[in-house]
Image (spheres, helix red, strand yellow):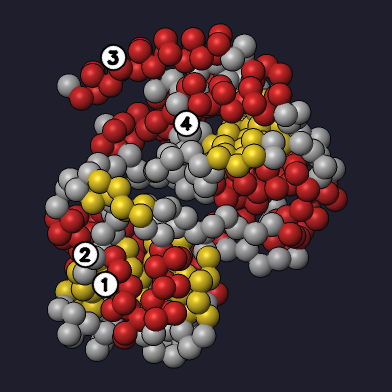
Amino acid sequence: MANIFQRIKNIGHLLVAIFANIYYRFPSKEIKVIGVTGTDGKTTTANLIYHILSSSGKKASIISTVSAKIGTHEHDTGFHVTTPSSFGVQKYIRQAVEEGSEYFVLETTSHALDQNRVFGVKYDVSLITNITHEHLLYHGSFEHYVKTKVQLAHCSKKTFINIDDESYDYILKYIGDAHVETYGLHDNAEHSADISKKIDKKLAHFNKYNYLAAYLVCKELHINEDKIIHAMKTYVLPSGRLEVVYDKDFLVIVDFAHTPNAIDSVLSSIRSDYVSKGRLIHIFGAAAFRDDEKRAPMGRASAKYSDLVILTEEDYRTEDPFDIASQIAKGLDEKGFKGVGQDEFGTEVKQYAVIIDRLEAIMKAFEIAKKNDVIILTGKGHEMSLNRNGKEYHWNDKQEITKILRSS
């Protein structure tokens, strides 16, 4: 019933999108639009493309999870929003055209595609970074989620697809006559390269895909290769993406990872790049009304690399946060982790504790942290709010960590 209701609503969204296109005079016809979709890596890749274009002397604008940069102006796109409404999308593209931008990078979510928010946008080139467990409460099934993401390819002149991702075989079912090319780190892809070697810069394994995708998109846009490489060397990851916020006796990192795949990728990278003599302490939760089925797998992914885990809040909205934590904990239990109280937590490895208040969770991690330990907070990244009982409260992981450290 919920899916039927959403389909009816989407007809209304389509009518609004048609009117928005007419009102703003189909602005995407006057600018080169680059679309970036996928479950993980969208923001990093979209902002890298924008950085390359800008560093190469091109006038560019972008809408991403972090913000909207239109010409010389930066806008906040709102709480928990990546792709704005159809009127917002068309307005921003029109503003970019009026300010002289040649390129518009548009991070495009599955919700935006399904709800016709980007209807009428003419993409010159696009890419699908990966498709993993997420948003299944909305989409109903992984198949529908994939089908929705692939709509982007049918709106684009050319689309690059990650052949190494497990979703590739699913994607092939819905490609049809869309013009696609594959990329990856192995010889079976049409485009394969280890960009870290080209730019002489150490990259996390998952970022090798993001950088390769951005490289291919910019080559497709006829950006000079030397300029692409130079820009990649100076790129700084967006706020809340593998961001080191404290590095003294122990290390504290913030990352936006909120899916099993992202947690696995991020923790794997941290384990190999940052953890040598100490322990890896992971603090995380799961948001409500996204994908209940991903919670136990998130626990399993964390258990694969973490020594200690604190389960905490992450936009639990009107759901019981203890229920969310217990569902994640099933994955930890399966991997031999033991749930303990706060007093016992940290005395041995392979323990987890439930501390719903995110601030108290961070303080507990700091309390037990020893020299050479690494603390990683995932799920919130750059975001500036926490949703508790349906109400937004100001919150930013980096800011709260800084406050604690200043007062200690």
Foreground pick, 380 / 97: 97
Amino acid type indicated by mark 4:
Pro
Task: Assess whether mark 3 and mark 4 are in contact (beta carbons under 8 angstroms).
Answer: no
Amino acid type indicated by mark 2:
Ile
Task: Assess whether mark 2 and mark 1 are in contact (beta carbons under 8 angstroms).
Answer: yes
Which residue is disc 1 drawn over? 360
Q: Tag 1's secondary structure? A: helix
Of tags 3 and 1, the one toward the viewer is 1
Q: Tag 2's secondary structure? A: loop
In the picture, measured across the screen, residue 293 lies left or right of residue 405, that is left
Q: Upstream in the sequence, badge 3 or badge 1?
A: 3
Which residue is disc 4 drawn over? 84
Residue 271 in view of the camera: no
- Please report the residue visible at 68 percent of the width from the left and 16 percent of the height from the top: 29
Which residue is disc 2 drawn over? 356
**Distance (Cα) linking label 2 and label 3:** 37 Å
Q: Are there few (<14), some (14-19), or many (20+) residues within 10 Å of tag 3?
A: few
